[in-house]
Image (spheres, helix red, strand yellow):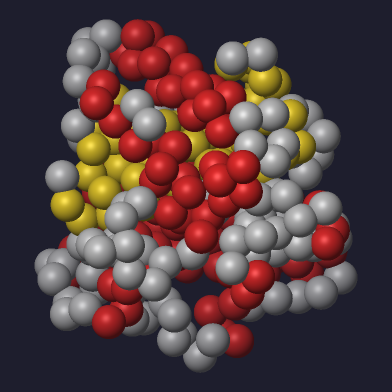
Amino acid sequence: MAPISFYVMAHQDDWQMFRGEQAWIDIQAGGRVVFVYTTAGDAGRTDGWWEAREQGAIACCRLASPGQLKYAVQQFNGHAITVVTCGATASYFLRLPDGNLDNGGYGTPAYGYQSLLQLQLSNKAMTAVDGSAQYTTWHDLCATVQKILSWETANSGNASPWVNCSDYDTTYNPGDHPDHYATGAVVLSFAVEYPVAWWVGYDIANRNPNLPPDQVGMKYRLIFRYNDTMLSETTMNGYPTDEYAQAAGVGYDDKMQKSYFRM
Ligand SMILES: [Zn+2]
């Protein structure tokens, strides 16, 4: 049976930034690659920003695995979840509100200060930014992501697929986004079922380059495709945003040559 691998993360540019080379390699190897995004990455905005980010993520799948783009809504654990397939990839978008880095993971006014962190700490319910689903407990969210993975795994016939995810542990992965940690904790809740590669997030900026040039090229191709799509989507939204240019490359160039993870 065809192999399958998973990438579970908070945001639409996380896998390209932190583990893009491995996803690219997995796709080129001919397997199915499944991406699960816990948040909408909305940044507290209601002006088409998160929709643009989804388009950026999908464009990266299309770059690495060209094919027809198909949208569907599928039920997992009683929740309606949008899934977008293209080529050998499937992308599941849970669209939960952004925890907001600046507010320490406690959300934004636009979405009633909902966040993964508070769902985890106190079962404060969360509703997807498009109103498509509600999660009333932390266990509810964990069980839903677990069902997506187990359903895809069963279809693949691959008994023990790799799951790639942001590291939940601040010792190995210091200084990361609260939504990255919380998404790692979601996977941790059922991690006994899979081999997991826990990746380092923002902190790779502080580490030494460790990727060969061809893999650096894979990450650059992905993040440029994401950035170009964001620019074209936000231009049509009326606020052209070139994140790479605005950052003068910083925040990107300090991550492309690196990939750190533990198993
Ligand atoms: Zn992120």
Horizontal and vertical percent position of residue 42: 71, 57
Can you name the residue that lies furthest to the bottom here?
248
Say left or right for 81 vs 87. Answer: right
Answer with the quarter of the image where residue 5 lies: top left
Q: Quadrant of the C terminus?
A: top left
Residue in the image at 77% along x and 44% along y = 129
Residue at 64% of width from left, 64% of height from top? 100
- The residue drawn where x is 81% and y is 52% is 111
At which x and y percent is residue 78? 66, 13
Quarter of the image with the N terminus in it: top left
How many marks do you count on the picture? 0
Residue 64 in sight from this viewpoint: no
Q: Name which quarter of the figure residue 132 lies in.
A: top right
Q: Residue at x 72, y 37 (%)?
A: 125
Q: Nearer the viewer, residue 211 or 28?
A: 211
Where is residue 81 shown, x and y percent of the image?
Answer: 65, 26
| Residue 110 shows in this picture | yes
Q: Residue 156, relative to residue 180: is it above or below?
A: above
Above or below — where is 218 with respect to 73?
below
Q: Nearer the viewer, residue 173 or 40?
A: 173
Q: Quadrant of residue 68?
A: top right
Q: What percent of the width, then of the height, locates residue 134?
A: 74, 29
Question: Taking 259 as reference, is 114 above or below it?
Answer: above
Q: Is residue 89 left or right of residue 29?
A: right
Q: In front here: 173 or 121?
A: 121
Q: Is residue 40 above or below residue 226?
A: above
